[in-house]
Image (spheres, grey):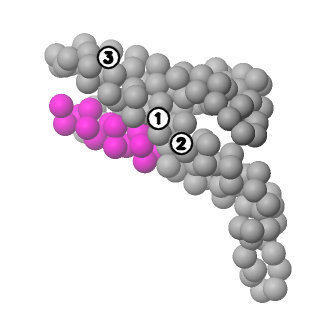
Amino acid sequence: MYAFIILCILFAVKHFLADWQFQTTWMVHGKRRSGFRFIPALFIHSLIHGYLTLYIVAAWFSLFEKVPPSRCLVFAGIDAGSHFIIDKLKVTAEFKDWHEFAFYEKGCARDFQRFRLELNFLDQLLHAMVYLLLIYYITLV
């Protein structure tokens, strides 16, 4: 139980660091570029997430269990890949014509700011679900 709680805290701190401290303005604007020009910024941002996950998992396994390094790379790859996909889906939804996504409540279209808030909540929820799955498998090993 303590392992689960400690790993949840480590992954929450990792996510904060990767999304706020280590994400540059170039990455924020770059992942919103059209065509395939978003790839470098989003790829580097996702690599940061993967590297920090690799660091957490490798440190955890070296302290508590003997696990092959390839398994640590799998966890990091899953985190980086899922982060790339989730962030790309979020940015794509943000910049579509938001009226396509709006539905009507009592005759009024939802506010765009509320839509973005819900989209950001969904984005963070998906990241948290990935972390919970990773933590579940880390504690199973």
Residue 135 seen in the current view: yes
The residue pinned by badge 1 equals 81
Across and down, in percent, residue 36 comes to 68, 35
Q: Hey, which residue is sitting farthest bottom in the picture? A: 106
Residue beneath the point at 42% across and 43% down? 130
Dot 2: few (<14), some (14–19), or many (≥20) neighbours within 10 Å?
few
Mark in the foreground, 3 or 2: 2
Q: Image height check: is 94 above or below 81?
A: below
Q: Residue at x 34, y 43 (%)?
A: 133
Q: In the rendering, which numbered label is found on residue 58?
A: 3
Task: Tell me if residue 42 comes above or below residue 64 in the rendering.
Answer: below
The x, y position of residue 125, in whole percent, is 52, 50
Mark 1 and mark 2: span between their CA atoms? 6 Å
Give residue 61's position: percent from left, percent from top: 25, 19
In the image, is 30 to the left or to the right of 86? right
Position of residue 71 relative to residue 33, above or below, is above
Specify whether residue 10 is in view: no
Residue 112 falls in which quadrant of the image?
bottom right
Asked whether 133 falls inside the magenta stretch, the response is: yes
Closer to the chain start, of discs 1 and 3, is: 3
Q: Residue at x 83, y 80 (%)?
A: 108
Rendered image: mark on residue 85: 2
Which residue type does callout 1 highlight?
A: Gly
Residues drawn in magenta: 128-141
In the rendered image, residue 59, in percent from the top left (x then y), is placed at: 33, 15
Name which residue type carries label 3.
Ala
Q: Look at the magenta stretch and give its main secondary structure.
A: helix
User: How many numbered circles does the render carry?
Assistant: 3
From the viewer's perspective, is the residue at label 1 or at label 3 nearer? 1
* Secondary structure beneath label 1: helix
